[in-house]
Image: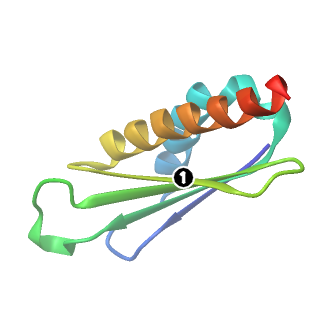
Amino acid sequence: MQFQLNTDSNIEGDTRLAEIAEDIVTSAVGHLSGRLTRVEVHLIDTNAAKGGSDDIKCTIEARPEGMQPQTVTHADANVESALRGGAKKLRSLLDSEFGKLSRR
C-alpha cells in the first residue's frame, strides 16, 4: 500500500507530519492494507491564519484493488484530530464495503 500526504500552503507538510499521518491511517486500516493499492491524505486549513473550530479539513482517499476509490472527509480543530476522525470514518467505510463484497 502506497501512502501519500498532500497539504495546502497553510499546513507545513514535513516528514514528521507525513509519518504521523501514515501511522494514524495505517493503524486504522492496516488490517486491509493487502487489499489497498494507495491511500492519499489531503489536509486543508480552511480558515488559514484566522483559526477557529473545525477549520482543519482532512480528506482521505483509499484505492481498493478492483473497486472505485473510496473517499471520506472529516473537519476538526487541529491536524491530528482531523486525521484521527478521517481515519476512523475510512475504516468504517472500508469495513462496510468489503463486508458487502464478502456477503455476495
* Looking at the image, residue 66 lies above or below residue 19: below
Residue 71 placement (x, y as % from top left): 58, 55
Outermost residue on the front side: it is 104
Residue 23 placement (x, y as % from top left): 56, 33
Outermost residue on the right side: it is 66
* In-front residue for pair 22/37: 37
Identified by mark 1, the residue type is Thr
Residue 32 location, quadrant: top right
The structure residue drawn at horizontal position 25% and vertical position 48%, both measured from the top left corner, is 78
Residue 4 placement (x, y as % from top left): 65, 57
Mark 1 Cα shell of 10 Å, populated few (<14), some (14-19), many (≥20): few
Residue 55 placement (x, y as % from top left): 22, 61
State which quarter of the image contains the N terminus.
Answer: top right
* In-front residue for pair 79/68: 68
The structure residue drawn at horizontal position 54% and vertical position 49%, both measured from the top left corner, is 18
Q: Is residue 101 left or right of residue 22?
A: right
The structure residue drawn at horizontal position 63% and vertical position 31%, both measured from the top left corner, is 96
Q: Is residue 23 visible?
A: no
Q: Is residue 50 left or right of residue 70?
A: left
State which quarter of the image contains the C terminus.
Answer: top right
Question: SS class of the residue under badge 1?
Answer: helix
Q: Which residue is mark 1?
A: 15
The structure residue drawn at horizontal position 38% and vertical position 39%, both measured from the top left corner, is 85
